[in-house]
Amino acid sequence: MFAVFEDGGRQFRVQNGDVLAIDYRNDVSDGQVITFDKVLLANGGGPSIVGQPLISGATVTAEIVTAQLKGLKLEIQTFHRRNASKRHTGHRQKYTRIKITGISIPNLQVIERPKATENSASEAPSVATTAT
């Protein structure tokens, strides 16, 4: 089962247990639960439910893992030749790391498929070859 929700102008495809980084939220703390209600699409193994533009009553809940996380440092350099003009600045974007704990979609048909085991691939018949 997966859902696509929108947050901060971006769309995220998530399943239960996924961990992802969203835009920084300064009013949350570690362990707090937040809810996203802008769910655009959901699928439970059968036919998908597509919102027009949103699925009414659908929510995705998540737990805050890290309230403030810094991204990679971006180096910005400006250089004009023969002008003795150089400028160097940097930027680090802040993020909030979340873990998806639940997806609630009304009228969604969920079909559970058995997971493939590692033994099923090894049980394939082996072909014996003889060297002559």
Image: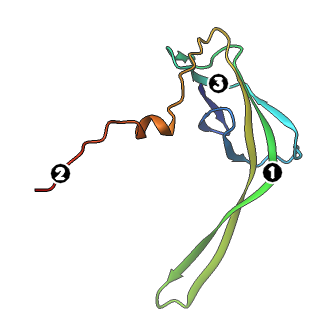
For the residue carrying disc 2, how many other residues have a C-alpha within 10 Å: few (<14), some (14-19), or many (20+)?
few
Residue closer to the observer: 94 or 131: 131
Image position, residue 23 (x, y; %): 71, 47
Q: Amino acid at mark 2?
A: Thr
**Amino acid of disc 1:** Thr
Query: x%, y% of residue 32?
Result: 88, 39
Q: CA distance from mark 2 to mark 3?
A: 59 Å
Q: Residue at x 87, y 47 (%)?
A: 30
Give the side of residue 14 with respect to residue 34, left or right: left
Label 1 belongs to which residue?
Answer: 66
Image quadrant containing the C terminus: bottom left
Label 3: which secondary element: strand
Residue 7 - label: none
Q: Nearer the viewer, mark 1 or mark 2?
A: 2
Amino acid tagged 3: Val
- Left or right: residue 100 versus residue 107 is right
Q: How far is mark 1 from mark 2, CA to CA?
A: 59 Å
> From what the image shows, is residue 56 above or below residue 130?
above
Residue drawn where x is 70% and y is 64% of the image: 92
Circle 2 residue = 130
Where is mark 3, residue-wise?
Answer: 39
The number of callouts visible is 3
Q: Is residue 97 left or right of residue 44?
A: right
Quadrant housing residue 120: top left
Dot 1 surroundings within 10 Å: few (below 14), some, or many (20 or more)?
A: some
